[in-house]
């Protein structure tokens, strides 16, 4: 039985309390409101409409509109339960209320309410009056009504499917253009731009987007008329709407790109325009260039106009007197300098070096020759910002670029010297490892010289540049400089009292240790005591925390580099210091916490199973952090949302969700990073200390398994997948691997099916293979195996289709090198996924008897199709790899099941063994060896052809080239198998005297470790058996064989059992 509703006065007080900042009063009002909504919904909506009609308190009236919107939209689920006559009354009253409304906040809230209700009713044809009302309002209403109707159009675009609007699009375009011609109210004109932006941004078909192209000139005209006066904030709003279009549907501007770019660059260049307007105009240009680079490149003079503007922004840098002794500039607001830096980076990446470099090089050289330090600084910063996007072009002249940058290490102005160091740091990233290999003799001495600069901030940045250089440098190139480099860094550490300088120096030591590994032992006793002393002292203030964190990073990296023998003596003390620091109840923003966890992982890698005693207090911390709940909140975007800046560590996204409307999603990114780090450390501990971690596998599983579908960060899903096979490997003996495997595979299949990120999908499929390979055969039930087969086929087909789509796009843009390169990167990602699926198919064949018939019915016809003329070498290679695994593993499970398919498979292997593509050849020749071993009877029929093809591969003039070396190694391995398993063939072609010289002449095998181990093992066995063809007449080949064994002894090219046999050969 429904309760009596409150009086109108009582209800007004409830609404007023809903607006209260006092939690108790607001919570009580929310409870009373919920009771009314549940018991008297019709009375509720009429009461809200009544207060909107007669109320005098406009804040209260706006709140009524907000409440009404939440009640009658889909999420509120109240309107459909109202009596028909009340529903009709609500629709009529809402339209009547919005017409005379003069209060902007109330008018906007009413518009949101109408749009919310309209989203529910329009698609069902239950509010036919709405659209005529809106069109008439835009055409004939006063300014207030026009704004309301345009706001409603904007909101409806976020609710309804774009197909609903298609019949109305021409009329809507005309209405928006009509509103943009409004002479008396600029807010109406900008509202029309915003409404058009909302509508165009949700359209999925190009043919619908282009209908709005005639309105672009009206938009530009409106923006232009907003400039130079009190209405410039409206220009900002209008350009922001264009940015939204540029992000989602840039094709709107395709036919007017030159006009649009000219207009926006003119705004961004004008010093008479407010900074915020200039910056958003430049942002529009950058966004459009990123989303439509192909057409942007064809705009005449675009780079000539854009690049100088961005460079000019860089010259606006101000220089404070304390700059050299402080770590950071005041970055509380975005400056033109910041905008210019970002612009150069984004435009060079978007348009590519072929377009950017001709303009960039000339301007940079001009700036570097300027007498003004701001210009020289700008030139160097521009060079570093464009380096990645122009990498191919800059690489041709890298020697002169490096020389030019190093020359500015001697500049008189400290900001220029700093930017030169910064440029070297950036080049060390963008051109590694070639830059390190080629220019170490000029760069490292110059950086060491800069460690003696009189400006502390430059010294700190030099240490940072050393980190960048060392991270990608091979030890052979840095070894000659280490003594002097370490000495100079130690001098800085001893003489500096500035913590930010010392932090960077410790990071440099860590990087050096990581680079030179065992060779760092000679410096260990000079650095580690200082680090231990630093860690032994508790921080006196917040400024000490990062220095201690860097010390933790440094000492743990040094320990990992020098190894257990050197570090073990200090490890216990370091672990105690890390533990005591963490136990001291660190503040939430203390960086030491994460550095401690990373330090534990490195020390564990150093000590291996000897780290196990520390696990009881290490693992609980890691598990706790891995299981933290990420703070993700989803709320309505209210009409009075002020768009306040995000708090630190929180990212806010506003999404238009079809059928729901605009939603504000806030994610605490700092927690995501903490969670990702913890998952990564669990992976590391399971890999390095499997025995010690065995007792924690069940706890780890409980946390990690759900993270396969973690929606907010791909990195976490990727890491979780890598943990799966490690958990199986570390599983304690008393637990059943089969149970664990089935549990994990079930979740993996669900995750693979749901995954949209190609890179993560690769990891998930690889995880599936590794899990199977970590267990015995036939542990999966037949129904799960069937599900695996269906899913792998589905993933393969979808990836194959995406590759086809990318290939079609490549043909459309074949005149654009940079665009082709980007598409090629997409194709490579899909190729990797396809390869992982083929590996997974092979693992499933190997580990499950019931999959052999599934392969025959699902994958065999697919592979035959891939070998046809409609596919390229990549697809053919994948098909042959699948056949190789089917024969190799399937024959061992059920030779009879494989037998019917052998002849077509062998025919395909022979056909492609003389391919011009080395990867395809490799798959084919490997398969011939597999068939020689596992399909001996059928293979005997084609031995002559197989021998001919394999010998031809080995005798190819390019056989030893890097490109063909893998194919050659596999051909040699197959020749060895022919000698072993087909030696009695009637032709005599497989006898050792015919084939052995080919094998011996190619020793040692280095290109393919797996095949190298097999071949070397066979040769060693032949030597020990006294085979005269190997040993030669009177054992004349023995000395050379012994030397070969010595060279191979410390490599991965022979397995441990073979190494033991080789010792006997070396001993004579």
Image: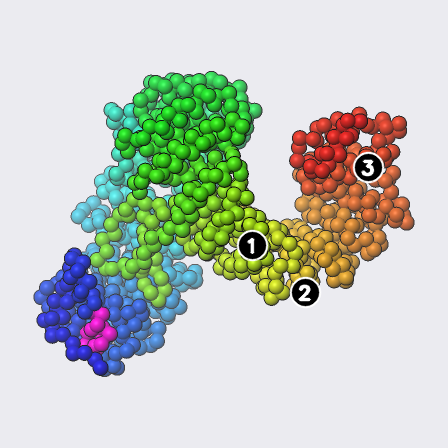
Query: Is residue 605 rendered to the left or right of residue 150?
Result: right
Viewer-side label of 3, 2: 3
Q: Earlier in the sequence, mark 3 or mark 2?
A: 2
Specify how the rendered protein is coloured: rainbow
Over which residues does the magenta segment extend? 33-44
Residue 33, image x and y in percent?
Answer: 20, 69
Residue ID for mark 3: 1022
Query: Can residue 952 be seen here?
Result: no
Residue at 42%, 46% (x, y): give it: 620
Give the secondary structure at mark 3: helix
Which of the 4 image quarters holds residue 123? bottom left
Separation of marks 3 and 2 at Cα, in angstroms: 42 Å
Q: In the image, is residue 914 above or below residue 431?
A: below
**Camera-side residue of 241 and 436:** 436
Quarter of the picture containing the C terminus is top right
Give the secondary structure at mark 1: loop
Q: In the image, is residue 646 above or below residue 750?
A: above
Q: Which mark is residue 857?
A: 2
Residue at 44%, 37% (x, y): give it: 600
Residue at 67%, 39% (x, y): give it: 1009
Q: Are marks 1 and 2 in contact (CB under 8 Å)?
A: no
Badge 2: how crowded within 10 Å, few (<14), some, or many (20+)? few
Query: Can residue 982 be seen here?
Result: yes
Q: Earlier in the sequence, mark 3 or mark 1?
A: 1
Q: Are marks 3 and 1 in contact (CB under 8 Å)?
A: no
Residue ID for mark 1: 735
Badge 3: how crowded within 10 Å, few (<14), some, or many (20+)? some
Give the secondary structure at mark 2: helix
**Camera-side residue of 222 and 237:** 237
């Amino acid at each position: 039985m429904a309760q009596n509703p409150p009086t109108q006065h009582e209800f007004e007080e409830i609404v007023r309390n809903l607006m209260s900042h006092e939690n108790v009063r607001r919570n009580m009002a929310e409870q009373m409101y919920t009771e009314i909504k549940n018991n008297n919904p019709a009375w509720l909506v009429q009461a809200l409409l009544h207060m909107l009609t007669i109320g005098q308190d406009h804040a209260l009236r706006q709140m009524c509109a907000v409440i009404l919107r939440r009640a009658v939209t889909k999420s509120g689920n109240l309107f459909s339960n109202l009596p028909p006559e009340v529903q009709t009354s609500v629709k009529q009253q809402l339209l009547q209320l919005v017409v005379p409304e003069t209060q902007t906040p109330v008018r906007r809230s009413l518009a949101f309410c109408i749009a919310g209700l309209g989203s529910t009713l329009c698609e069902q044809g239950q509010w036919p009056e709405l659209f005529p009302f809106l069109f008439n309002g835009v055409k004939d209403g006063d300014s207030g009504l026009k704004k309301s109707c345009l706001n409603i159009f904007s909101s409806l675009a976020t609710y309804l499917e774009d197909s609903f609007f298609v019949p109305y699009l021409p009329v809507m375009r005309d209405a928006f253009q009509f509103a943009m011609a409004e002479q008396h109210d600029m807010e109406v004109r900008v509202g029309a731009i915003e409404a058009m932006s909302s509508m165009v941004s949700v359209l999925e078909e190009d043919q619908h987007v282009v209908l709005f192209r005639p309105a672009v000139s009206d938009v530009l005209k409106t923006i232009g008329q907003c400039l130079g006066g009190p209405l410039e904030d409206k220009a900002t709003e209008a350009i922001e709407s264009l940015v939204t279009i540029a992000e989602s549907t840039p094709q709107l501007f395709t036919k007017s790109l030159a006009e649009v770019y000219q207009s926006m660059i003119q705004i961004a260049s004008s010093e008479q325009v407010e900074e915020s307007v200039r910056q958003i105009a430049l942002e529009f240009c950058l966004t459009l260039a990123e989303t439509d680079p192909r057409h942007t490149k064809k705009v005449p003079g675009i780079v000539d106009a854009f690049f100088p503007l961005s460079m000019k922004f860089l010259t606006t840098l101000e220089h404070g007197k304390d700059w050299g002794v402080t770590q950071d500039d005041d970055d509380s607001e975005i400056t033109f300098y910041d905008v210019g830096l970002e612009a150069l980076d984004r435009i060079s990446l978007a348009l590519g070096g072929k377009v950017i470099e001709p303009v960039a090089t000339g301007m940079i050289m001009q700036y570097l020759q300027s007498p003004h330090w701001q210009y020289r600084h700008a030139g160097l910063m521009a060079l570093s910002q464009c380096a990645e996007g122009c990498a191919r072009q800059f690489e041709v002249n890298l020697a002169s670029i490096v020389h030019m940058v190093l020359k500015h290490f001697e500049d008189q102005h400290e900001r220029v010297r700093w930017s030169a160091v910064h440029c070297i740091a950036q080049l060390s990233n963008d051109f590694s490892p070639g830059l390190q290999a080629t220019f170490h003799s000029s760069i490292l001495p110059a950086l060491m010289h800069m460690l003696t600069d009189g400006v502390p901030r430059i010294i700190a940045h030099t240490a940072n540049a050393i980190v960048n250089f060392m991270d990608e440098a091979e030890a052979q190139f840095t070894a000659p400089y280490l003594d002097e480099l370490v000495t100079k860094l130690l001098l800085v550490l001893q003489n500096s009292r500035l913590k930010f300088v010392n932090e960077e120096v410790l990071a440099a030591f860590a990087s050096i240790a990581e680079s030179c590994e065992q060779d760092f032992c000679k410096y260990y006793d000079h650095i580690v005591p200082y680090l231990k002393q630093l860690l032994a002292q508790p921080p006196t203030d917040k400024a000490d925390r990062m220095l201690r964190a860097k010390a933790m990073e440094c000492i743990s990296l040094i320990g990992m580099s020098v190894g257990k023998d050197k570090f073990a003596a200090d490890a216990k003390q370091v672990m105690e210091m890390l533990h005591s620091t963490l136990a001291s109840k660190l503040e939430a923003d203390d960086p030491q916490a994460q550095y401690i966890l990373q330090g534990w992982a490195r020390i564990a890698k150093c000590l291996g199973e000897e780290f196990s005693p520390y696990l009881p207090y290490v693992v609980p911390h890691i598990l706790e952090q891995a299981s933290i709940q990420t703070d993700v909140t989803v709320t309505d975007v209210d009409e009075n949302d002020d768009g306040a800046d995000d708090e630190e560590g929180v990212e806010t996204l506003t999404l238009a969700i079809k059928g729901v409307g605009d939603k504000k999603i806030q994610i605490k990114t700092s927690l995501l990073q903490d969670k990702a780090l913890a998952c990564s450390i669990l992976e590391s501990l399971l890999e390095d200390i499997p025995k010690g971690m065995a007792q924690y596998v069940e706890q780890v599983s409980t946390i990690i398994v759900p993270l396969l579908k973690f929606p907010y960060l791909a990195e976490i899903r990727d890491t979780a997948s890598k943990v799966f096979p490690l958990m199986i490997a570390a599983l304690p003996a008393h637990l059943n691997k089969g149970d664990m495997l089935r549990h994990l595979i079930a979740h993996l299949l669900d995750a693979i099916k749901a995954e949209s990120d190609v890179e993560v999908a690769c990891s998930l499929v690889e995880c599936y293979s590794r899990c199977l390979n970590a267990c015995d055969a036939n542990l999966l039930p037949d129904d799960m195996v069937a599900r695996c087969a269906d899913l792998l086929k589905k993933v393969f087909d979808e990836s194959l289709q995406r590759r086809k789509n990318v290939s079609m796009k490549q043909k459309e843009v074949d005149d654009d090198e940079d665009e082709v390169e980007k598409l090629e990167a997409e194709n490579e990602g899909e190729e990797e996924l396809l390869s992982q699926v083929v590996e997974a198919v092979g693992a499933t064949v190997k580990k499950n008897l019931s999959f052999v018939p599934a392969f025959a019915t699902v994958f065999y016809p697919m592979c035959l199709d891939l070998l046809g003329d409609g596919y390229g070498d990549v697809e053919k290679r994948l098909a042959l790899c699948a056949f190789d695994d089917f024969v190799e593993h399937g024959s061992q499970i059920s030779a009879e099941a494989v037998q019917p398919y052998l002849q077509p498979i062998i025919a395909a292997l022979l056909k492609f063994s003389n391919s011009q593509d080395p990867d395809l050849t490799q798959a084919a020749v490997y398969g011939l060896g597999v068939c020689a071993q596992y399909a001996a009877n059928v293979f005997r029929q084609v031995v002559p052809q197989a021998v001919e093809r394999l010998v031809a591969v080995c005798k190819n003039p390019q056989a030893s080239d890097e490109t063909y070396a893998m194919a050659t190694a596999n051909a040699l391995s197959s020749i060895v198998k022919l000698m072993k398993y087909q030696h009695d063939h009637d032709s005599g072609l497989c006898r050792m005297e015919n084939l052995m010289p080919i094998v011996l002449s190619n020793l040692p095998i280095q290109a393919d470790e797996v095949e190298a181990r097999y071949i070397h093992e066979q040769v060693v066995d032949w030597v020990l058996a006294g085979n005269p063809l190997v040993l030669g007449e009177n054992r004349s080949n023995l000395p050379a064989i012994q030397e070969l064994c010595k060279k191979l002894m410390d490599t991965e090219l022979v397995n441990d059992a073979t190494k033991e046999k080789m010792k006997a050969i070396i001993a004579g």
